Amino acid sequence: MLEGGCKVVKEGLLEKRSDGLLQLWKKKRCLLTEEGLLLVPPKLPEVPPPPGSESPPPPRVKQLHFSHMKTVDCVERKGKYVYFTVVMSGGREVDFRGPQEQGWNAEITLQMVQYKNRQAILAVKSTRHKQQHLAQQQPGPPALPSQPQPPPQPRGGLRARSASNSA
């Protein structure tokens, strides 16, 4: 469980292609939660800072939230790696590679679909709640007559043709 209360579904190392000119693959420790994918620099060896020196800044955590994800595209399987791309809603693409046997792309896709389904269910419940609230505030529909009215009769000039009359 993370500080924000999100449950970690999967944890491990993936490589992310950098956005720079050389587009190098950089290892990232990834935490897949019910809300998205957290990217953390890999753990550094625990060496205590010398006395009197400042502690290093905390590692920069990048979050790819499911609300901003459009899709996860599996690009190819090559050697021991599977290459996949996370496409964000703004059109930004984030490339990853990881061991095939770990199934990161499938697990990310599954969690994203479950997240979007939960959001859709919440939206429907919210809409229904609003509709019920509005229905309670509005006066009821006008009363219907107690005696059923006969259906309207066609007005003169309309006659059914018989089979012998049709030409």
Image (cartoon, rainbow, N blue to C red):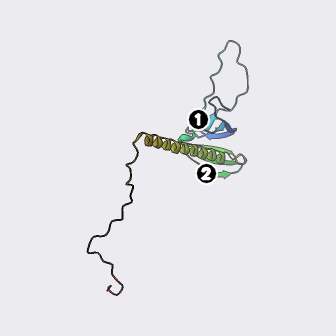
Q: Residue at x 66, y 31 (%)?
A: 2
Q: Nearer the viewer, residue 59 or 137?
A: 137
- Identified by mark 2, the residue type is Val
Q: Nearer the viewer, residue 27 or 110?
A: 110
Task: Give the residue furthest to the front.
Answer: 147
Q: Earlier in the sequence, mark 1 or mark 2?
A: 1
How many neighbours does mark 2 have within 10 angstroms: few (below 14), some (14-19), or many (20 or more)?
Answer: few
Residue 145 found in image quarter: bottom left
- Quick one: quadrant of the N terminus? top right
How many neighbours does mark 1 have within 10 angstroms: few (below 14), some (14-19), or many (20 or more)?
Answer: some
Q: Are marks 1 and 2 in contact (CB under 8 Å)?
A: no
Check the image and report above or below for 131 versus 156. above
Task: Give the residue furthest to the top.
Answer: 52
SS type, badge 1: strand
Q: Position of residue 88 (x, y in %)?
A: 53, 43
Check the image and report above or below for 50 versus 14. above
Q: Position of residue 78 (x, y in %)?
A: 68, 51
Q: Residue at x 68, y 12 (%)?
A: 52
Q: Residue at x 64, y 28 (%)?
A: 3
- Identified by mark 1, the residue type is Gln
SS type, badge 2: strand
Q: Is residue 86 visible?
A: no
Q: Which residue is mark 1?
A: 63
Q: Residue at x 65, y 48 (%)?
A: 106
Q: Which residue is mark 2?
A: 75
State the CA–CA distance, disc 1 to disc 2.
22 Å
Q: Is residue 55 visible?
A: yes
Check the image and report above or below for 16 versus 147. above
